[in-house]
Image: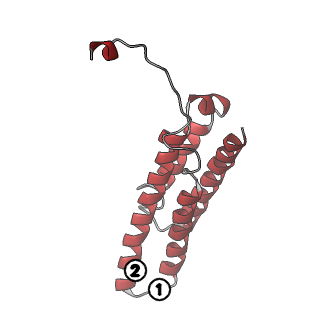
Amino acid sequence: MTTRLFAPTIEVSAHCDLPCGVYDPAQARIEAESVKAIIAKVADNDDPDFRTRAVLIKEQRSELVKHHLWVLWTDYFKPPHFEKYPQLHTLFNEATKLAGATGTKGEMDAAKADELLAKIDEIAEIFWETKKA
């Protein structure tokens, strides 16, 4: 028993928490597309019950965008990525803010949804570059 405690350890490293292939910025994009579609539907509908339900769903989808972005930011991307792509922290910060209370979660602004989608596309471009490496 004590020999196991003092046995040499083997250092291992992995790129991500699970084998690659489980992370994808498309999840955040799908939710952001839903947010944008909901904003358009609310603009075309005067029914207060519909609008209330739509706002609730939009807020939930915005929260899911943030979740999916945070998973990429904290679980997939590693220090070498942030060294190679120094703008990556800023992109994630801006994207999650655009999905938050001052963005699509708290507002009915289609322009904010478009900005969010553009940030997700920038993140996705870097993501797919890292997958090629």
Residue type for callout 2: Arg
Q: Residue at x 64, y 56 (%)?
A: 118
- Quarter the C terminus occupies: top right
Q: Residue furthest bottom?
A: 47
112 is higher (above) or lower (below) than 3:
below
Residue type for callout 1: Asn
Instruction: Give the camera-side residue of 5 and 26.
Output: 5
Q: Are marks 1 and 2 in contact (CB under 8 Å)?
A: yes
Residue 28 placement (x, y as % from top left): 53, 58
Residue 100 placement (x, y as % from top left): 43, 54
Residue at disc 1, secondary structure: loop
Marks counted in the figure total: 2
Q: Residue at x 55, y 33 (%)?
A: 78
| Residue at the disc numbered 2 | 51
| Residue at the disc numbered 1 | 45
Q: Residues within 10 Å of mark 1 (few under 14, many from 20)?
A: few
